[in-house]
Amino acid sequence: MTDRDRRSEFLNFMRMPDGSPLATIDVLDYLTVNGFFHAPASTKYHGNYEGGLFDHSLAVAKHLVGLTESCQLKWKNCRSPYLIGMFHDLCKIDQYRPERQGITLDGELIENPYHYEYNPDTLLKGHGDKSVMLLSQFYALTEEEIMCIRYHMGAFCPREEWNDYTRAVRAYPNVLWTHQADMLASHVEGV
C-alpha cells in the first residue's frame, strides 16, 4: 500500500457517523510531511515495517470504535475513539530510522528499510506524553482523551507509573478500553 492509499484510507475512516470529517487539511499535511503514513510502528515488534505506524493506528482506532459500539462505552466526546485510536502513537512519527547495515566496497552506505533503530535526534522524547503534545497542536483534547492517550500502554508503562495508571482508569474507564484496543491490534492481529 502506498502513502497515497493510506492517506485516502485515513480520510475515509476519520469521519463521524454523520459524515463530518475529523481531520483537516492541516492535520493531513502535518501527518504527511512528518512521515505518519510510512513510518514503522516499532523496531522489532508489531508493525516493524514501512507504513506499520499507520496500519497499527488504524487497527487500534477500528478496535476502539468497535468496542465503543459493542460494549456501549460512553465518552465525553463522540469523536474520542477515532482520535485516540488513530493518534495514540503519534509520538512514533520520528522515533525510528532505517538501521544502518554497513558500507559497500566502494564506500556507499547500505540501508535496509525493513530494519529500524531508535532515532537519537528526536527533539521530544516520551510516548503517551509526546503523543498528547503533538496532537494538541490540532485539537482541544478533553481530559479523558489525554488520559487515554497518556496511559494507553496500560501496565506496560514503567512500574513507578502503575498507581497513576490505576487512578486514570478509575477516573476514566475508557483508558482501560484504549489499552485493550491497542493489545488487540498489536498482540492479536500483530500489527
Image (cartoon, helix red, strand yellow):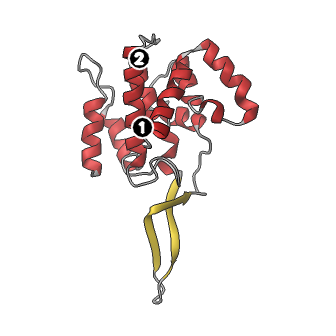
Q: Does the residue at mark 1 contact the one at mark 2 (Cβ under 8 Å)? A: no
Q: Position of residue 94 (x, y in %)?
A: 50, 51
Picture layout, residue 106 above or below residue 62: below
Spot the residue most to the bottom. 106
Label 1, label 2: how far apart the Cα atoms are: 16 Å
Decide: few, some or many residues near mark 2? Use Cα within 10 Å; few <14, some 14-19, many ≥20. Answer: some
Residue type at mark 1: give it: Ser
Query: Is 79 positioned to the left or the right of 124 in the image?
Result: left
Rendering quarter of residue 157: top right
Task: From the image, state whether disc 1 or disc 2 is nearer to you.
Answer: 2
What residue sits right under mark 1 in the picture? 57
Label 1 sits on a secondary structure element that is helix
Residue type at mark 2: give it: Thr
Picture layout, residue 51 above or below residue 83: below
Rendering quarter of residue 130: top right
Picture layout, residue 181 above or below residue 51: above
Q: Position of residue 160 (x, y in %)?
A: 76, 32
Q: Position of residue 52 (x, y in %)?
A: 41, 48
Rendering quarter of residue 147: top right
What residue sits right under mark 2 in the picture? 68
At x 46%, y 71%, the residue is: 111
Q: Position of residue 135 (x, y in %)?
A: 48, 33
Residue sitting nearer the eye, 104 or 67: 67
Label 2 sits on a secondary structure element that is helix
Q: Is residue 39 visible?
A: yes
